[in-house]
Amino acid sequence: MDPGMTREELIALGMDAAGAEALRKRLAALAPGAGSAEIWTAVSTGALSPEVPHAVHRALYDRVFADWDTGKAPRPAWTPSPAVADGSNVAAACRRLGLSDYAAFHAWSVRERPAFWGDLIEVLDIPFRKPPSAPADLSAGPEHPRWLPGARLNIADACFQADRSATAVIVQREGQPLERVTVGELDVLSNRVACALGALGVGAGDAVAIAMPMTLESVAAYLGILKAGAVVVSIADSFASGEIATRLRIAGARVAVTQDVVLRAGKTLPMYRKVVDAGADRVIVVPAGDDFAVELRPADRAWSALLSAPEHFEAVERAPDDTMNVLFSSGTTGEPKAIPWSHTTAIKCAMDGYYHHDIHPGQVVAWPTNIGWMMGPWLVFASLMNRAAMALYYGAPNSRGFCEFVQDARVNMLGVVPSLVKAWRGGDMTSGLDWSAITAFSSTGEASNPDDYLWLMARAGYKPVVEYCGGTEIGGGYVSQTLVQPASPSTFSTACLGLDLYVLDEDGQPTNNGELFIVPPSIGLSLSLLNRDHHEVYYEGTPSGPKGELLRRHGDQVGCVPGGYFRALGRADDTMNLGGIKVSSAEIERVLNTVEGIVETAAVAIEPPDGGPSILVVYAVTKDGAGGAAALKPAMQRAVARDLNPLFRVHDVVVVPSLPRTASNKVMRRVLRAQYNEGA
């Protein structure tokens, strides 16, 4: 396929005359080879640049792949070069293990699960106080594995194995220069946290909450709590005090670490007050600025008081299955599921970073997130356990400032959510920036828009997007990508290493469009819940696999694409992803039903027809005189922002006389989704 375009065609797509002529000459000079993938590689890396209008990128992409047979595989926007593939961690594993290619590697990782995890632990050089007798004991069956039986360790030790002078964290406050913190400095700071917690009476197994933005101090607090043998209770800073109180209660946390306020985009938002109102007995408080913006209670302590604590601390040894972190994920009832992460869960995070994201020592990893969501702890382990640095920006990620931070910090692996990419693109926030240090993007949280992701790949001279889908109860992903496989926008190329999956229809039969089920066991898969029956949530009533395997429920709808690829199709249950945050319909409806004039509501997530993040639509049954949708929508938005999360946005309200229900009185949200899509 000839990729050439005329000067007139390029001008019609938004280029000026000089730029169009220069690009036409670059295209004419290419010697790309015969196949569409080879031609596109030559065009995307040899002729196009981020300054060329996206309409030109898209037109060339469509022209090059006009004859591509999508019945065999999706159209790739990136194909690994021999140098990239051969230099990957996956290729190194294949050479070490004598395996022919990635397909053989994945098959081996599933067939020989204990051996796979044992090999990874050796490669990452996980430090043990007492080594395990074996990688795993699977004698109790796949639902009840024992990982690293007999071992003693503290997984925080695995985060400090790089040279002490190497960079561990790069931070930037809004309007301030970059700051670099070494491995040794982070080690000392986290040791001081551990010592200070001991002075407060916090011991092994005690719960300590962190409710604050993702900062150097929150990372040090996280690692210090782990070193003390205690349990981190992860709470997102965006939650209202009532939601914070629920999480403190479920996890039994009486001590919390937080900020006085949150400074973002010129706004000052309360943080310490929310934690106090939530009922925390003692709070360690970090000032967001140079001085405290609030007055502390007598029982609470300023972060600066920790800095005089001893700088040496030997991490408390724990058993591999001891809880190190409690995180929360929405189920289909109003109260969030409390999911314990053990000291082995971090190994899953590190594995996904090592193999699927191809993180190497000395690289820089950025992912706008929060310690309250699983990607916060994931970032800590995936970067530090792989001897890489994490990059943290204290301002809003949907800003020009963050995009400049990516450039200035020389970020190599950049994590995103689709709504963030849409904001960057819509605001032209990356214009003129050099993102050439990026070797890969990664995306999670929501279904992505293919055109937005073609635009994103072009920002770094066409680097792959590692689509990454999983959950808190998995400790990472179940489906992803590698840097040895072609990347097609908004598709996944493989089940994650160490586990397998099936896509089944309502009769439990394999299908190309249905509900995804995971084949256990794997390090990272949860083994218990604090406030639910774990077996009932994940295993009860699941079908058997085609080979008789025990299957684990996850709740995602997935489409199978030719060539072994997958697409995310949203949730199969009554949870949804809004802005990268998983929340249940019941949680939202509990808040909406408090709005004056409301009888009952049904919250549903609508997937846009062209792909991309879900939007929240509310069906409402109202009392007489309550007013129409236009009057109700602002009141509903205020209630959600006040009582649940200000990041959630009500897109539309539909007033109905009644909600469709099953014979057992369950609201049929699938019917409502179908009705809304039909009327769109």
Image (cartoon, rainbow, N blue to C red):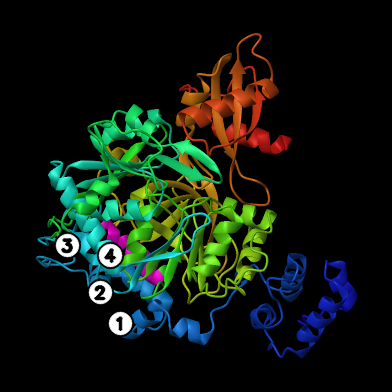
Q: Residue at x 68, y 54 (%)?
A: 427
Q: Is residue 348 magenta?
A: yes
Q: Residue at x 55, y 31 (%)?
A: 603
Q: Pointer 2 and pointer 1: residues touching (CB < 8 Å)?
A: yes
Residue 11 visible? The answer is yes
Mark 4 vs mark 3, foreground winner is 4
Mark 2 vs mark 4, foreground winner is 4
Label 2 packing within 10 angstroms: few (<14), some (14-19), many (20+): some
Q: Amino acid at mark 3?
A: Leu
Identify the element where label 3 is drawn.
loop
**Magenta span: chief secondary structure:** helix
Q: Which residue is mark 4?
A: 185
Of pointers 2 and 3, the one earlier in the residue sequence = 2
Q: Position of residue 660 (x, y in %)?
A: 58, 24
Residue 97 is tagged as 1
Q: Which residues are magenta?
A: 344-355
Of pointers 3 and 1, the one earlier in the residue sequence = 1
Classify 161 as above or below 528.
Answer: below
Q: Position of residue 507 (x, y in %)?
A: 46, 45
Q: Which residue is mark 2?
A: 119
Of pointers 2 and 4, the one earlier in the residue sequence = 2
Instruction: Return the residue nearer the eye: 160 or 97.
Output: 160
Instruction: Return the residue nearer the eye: 509 or 86.
Output: 86
Q: Which residue is mark 3?
A: 148
Q: CA distance from mark 1 to mark 4?
A: 37 Å
Identify the element where label 2 is drawn.
helix
Q: Amino acid at mark 4?
A: Glu
Residue 515 is tagged as none
Q: CA distance from mark 2 to mark 1?
A: 9 Å
